[in-house]
Image (cartoon, helix red, strand yellow):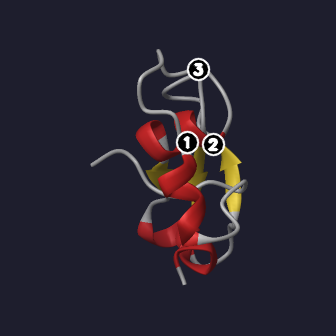
Amino acid sequence: MHGGVSPELDLIEDINKIDRFIEPPLKGFLCDLLWSDPCTDKEARSIKFQKNVERECSFKFGLEPVK
């Protein structure tokens, strides 16, 4: 699974404002929606966001941002 939440996501309505007719950037809100990954079960409770070193872009996110 890839794609998820972003530390730049404040309101769910912000998703509707995205220009979907561009090449996805390597950082920022659109990149995060496409490429962020959930943390492992062990990490999920203690982490909000951390760099996603496996993908070399975006973030890994824990349980709190999902809520």
Which of the 4 image quadrants contains residue 41?
bottom left
Residue 23, above or below 9: above
Secondary structure at numbered mark 1? helix
Q: Mark 2 points at which residue?
A: 29
**Mark 3: which amino acid?**
Pro
Residue drawn at (68%, 75%) of the image: 46
State the residue lying farthest toward the bottom. 67
User: Which residue carries the number 1 mark?
Assistant: 32
Tell me if residue 60 comes above or below residue 19 in the rendering.
Answer: below
Q: How crowded is mark 3: few (under 14 residues within 10 Å), some or many (20 or more)?
A: few
**Where residue 51 sits in the image (x, y, percent)?**
68, 40
Which quarter of the rendered picture does the C terminus lie within?
bottom right
Badge 3 is on which residue?
25
What element does badge 2 sit on? helix
Q: Distance between the residues labelled 1 and 2?
A: 5 Å
Measure the alpha-carbon separation of dots 3 and 1.
Answer: 9 Å
Indicate the position of residue 42 as horizontal and vertical percent values.
50, 70
Q: Which amino acid does label 2 sit on?
A: Phe
Task: Give above or below for 2 relative to 13.
Answer: above
Determine whether label 1 and label 2 are within 8 Å by CB. yes
Dot 2 crowding, Cα within 10 Å, few <14, some 14–19, many 20+: many
- Please name whichever residue, 30 or 36, is drawn nearer the observer in this view of the structure: 30
Q: Which amino acid does label 1 sit on?
A: Asp
Residue 33 place in picture, x, y as percent: 48, 46
Q: Residue furthest left?
A: 1
Residues tagged 3 and 1 counted as in contact (Cβ below 8 A) = no
Rounded to the nearest angstrom, the CA distance separating label 2 from label 3 is 9 Å
Find numbered disc 3 in the image and state the secondary structure of the residue it sits on. loop
What residue lies at 51% left-to-right and 34% top-to-bottom?
19
43 and 62: which is toward the camera: 62
In this figure, what is the number of numbered marks?
3
